[in-house]
């Protein structure tokens, strides 16, 4: 199945909190339930939460008891506000909600509006898969045969509706017959690399080695990495990139060692209305995500410790070699190349 999909009037999604131990599918019936699934990261990854939020609006349209168009629109706006507040950093969430509302605004008949909302949400989900496949083709062109690729977090099918962004590039290169090997950062604190990326790569039969996050610098310095591929939650107009916490450190060490660093993003992740990385809101997540791990039967920290848990960091554009999108690769100066790519209709 897809990571998130519409089925028989409900939103179905893979519960990523339980992987790799258990494959369970959630069936959600209200926009509030979808917002909660996004907040609690049952569904995660920028494109996947965008699609989930769009389907959340379709649930709101379906459940609304409003008899007239004005009442239905109010219900939609209320649901959009709840969904939008679920997570702040990934721009795909707001992008998807805004797209559904904008494209459906002209419908004057309530039934037509209900149908239009679902059709637009479905279009966002279908396009995501298409876009990722194109992104995979664009990116695979720069992957040398025999490459060792360092990867952070999870950017695969689970982070999108299907196929993946940075992992999609790796997957395309593998499908093209190139020999690739992936160094998988475990990605503390929620272990998206160890739990999700390793699970996906295993199923795809792509060779990989799981490493502790702290080991990445060693592999970069000793010449064992050909390139670093990551996803992103938001790319600012100047090319600064917000992605999973720990990405910045990787980019700096990659540059220090002459290793190319490429974020791979659908153009829906590029936010030209955000001038620089300093303008990107960084989500602070609950302290328990850092402390509530069990190591050899023991908690990993004493009770009551103070914790900081920023979920993302910003990599300044000077560390970015290029930004791989479904419409081509943007190179510096990003303030010119990103705008050109976003505004190019193809
Ligand atoms: O907190 P998460 O797991 O939602 O963070 C995900 C990431 O940081 C991904 O790299 C990003 O969303 C791109 S996924 C294609």
Image (spheres, rainbow, N blue to C red):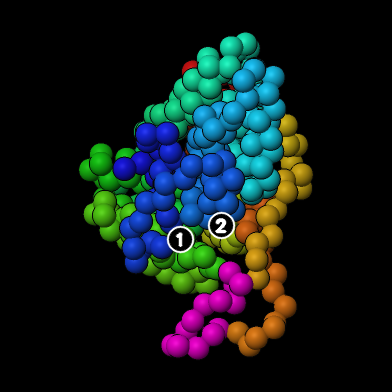
How many other residues sit within 10 Å of disc 1, few (<14), some (14-19) or many (≥20)? many
- Measured along the vertical axis of the image, is residue 117 above or below residue 205? above
Q: Name the mark on residue 17.
A: 1
- Measured along the vertical axis of the image, is residue 317 above or below residue 295? above
SS at mark 2?
loop
Image side of residue 164 versus residue 76, left or right = left
298 part of magenta stretch = yes
In percent of width and height, residue 239 lies at 65, 39
In percent of width and height, residue 138 lies at 41, 33
Which residue: 58% across, 69% down?
289
**Nearer the N terminus, badge 1 or badge 2?**
1
In percent of width and height, residue 17 lies at 45, 61
User: Is the distance from the Cβ of mark 1 to the nearest ligand 1 atom less than 8 Å?
Assistant: no
Q: CA distance from mark 1 to mark 2?
A: 8 Å
Which residue: 65% across, 35% down?
80
Residue 332 seen: no
User: Looking at the image, do the residues carrying marks 1 and 2 touch, with CB atoms under 8 Å apart?
Assistant: yes
The residue under label 2 is 40
Which residue: 59% across, 62% down?
246
Asked where in the image residue 72 lies, by quadrant, the reply is top right
SS at mark 1?
loop
In percent of width and height, residue 56 lies at 54, 37
Residue 204 seen: yes
Q: What range is drawn magenta here?
A: 288-300
Q: Please identify the quadrant where the N terminus is shown.
A: top left
Q: Nearer the viewer, residue 32 or 337?
A: 32
How many other residues sit within 10 Å of disc 2, few (<14), some (14-19) or many (≥20)? some
Q: Nearer the viewer, residue 116 or 325?
A: 116
């Amino acid at each position: 199945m897809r990571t998130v999909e519409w089925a028989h009037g409900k939103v179905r999604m893979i519960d990523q909190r339980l992987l790799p131990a258990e494959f369970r599918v959630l069936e959600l019936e209200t926009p509030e339930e979808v917002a909660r699934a996004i907040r609690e990261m049952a569904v995660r990854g920028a494109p996947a939460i965008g699609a989930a939020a769009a389907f959340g609006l379709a649930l709101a349209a379906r459940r609304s008891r409003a008899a007239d168009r004005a009442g239905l629109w109010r219900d939609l706006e209320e649901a959009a506000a709840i969904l939008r507040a679920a997570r702040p950093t990934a721009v795909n969430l707001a992008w998807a909600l805004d797209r559904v509302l904008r494209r459906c605004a002209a419908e004057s008949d309530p039934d037509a509006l209900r149908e239009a909302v679902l059709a637009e949400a479905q279009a966002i989900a279908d396009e995501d898969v298409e876009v990722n496949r194109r992104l995979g083709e664009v990116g695979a062109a720069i992957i040398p045969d025999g490459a060792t690729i360092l990867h952070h977090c999870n950017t695969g099918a689970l982070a999108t509706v299907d196929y993946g962004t940075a992992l999609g590039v790796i997957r395309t290169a593998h499908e093209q017959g190139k020999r690739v090997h992936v160094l998988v950062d475990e990605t503390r604190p929620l272990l998206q690399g160890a739990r999700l990326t390793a699970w996906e790569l295993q199923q795809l039969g792509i060779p990989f080695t799981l490493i502790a996050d702290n080991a990445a610098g060693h592999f970069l310095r000793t010449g064992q990495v050909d390139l670093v591929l990551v996803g992103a939650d938001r790319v600012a107009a100047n090319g600064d990139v917000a992605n999973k916490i720990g990405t910045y450190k990787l980019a700096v060490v990659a540059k220090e060692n002459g290793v190319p660093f490429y974020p791979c993003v659908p153009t829906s992740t590029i936010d030209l209305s955000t001038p620089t990385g300093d303008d990107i809101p960084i989500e602070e997540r609950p302290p328990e995500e850092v402390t509530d791990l069990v190591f050899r039967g023991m908690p990993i920290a004493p009770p009551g410790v103070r914790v900081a848990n920023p979920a993302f960091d910003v990599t300044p554009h000077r560390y970015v070699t290029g930004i791989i999108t479904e419409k081509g690769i943007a190179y510096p100066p990003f303030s010119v190349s990103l705008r050109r790519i976003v505004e190019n209709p193809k």
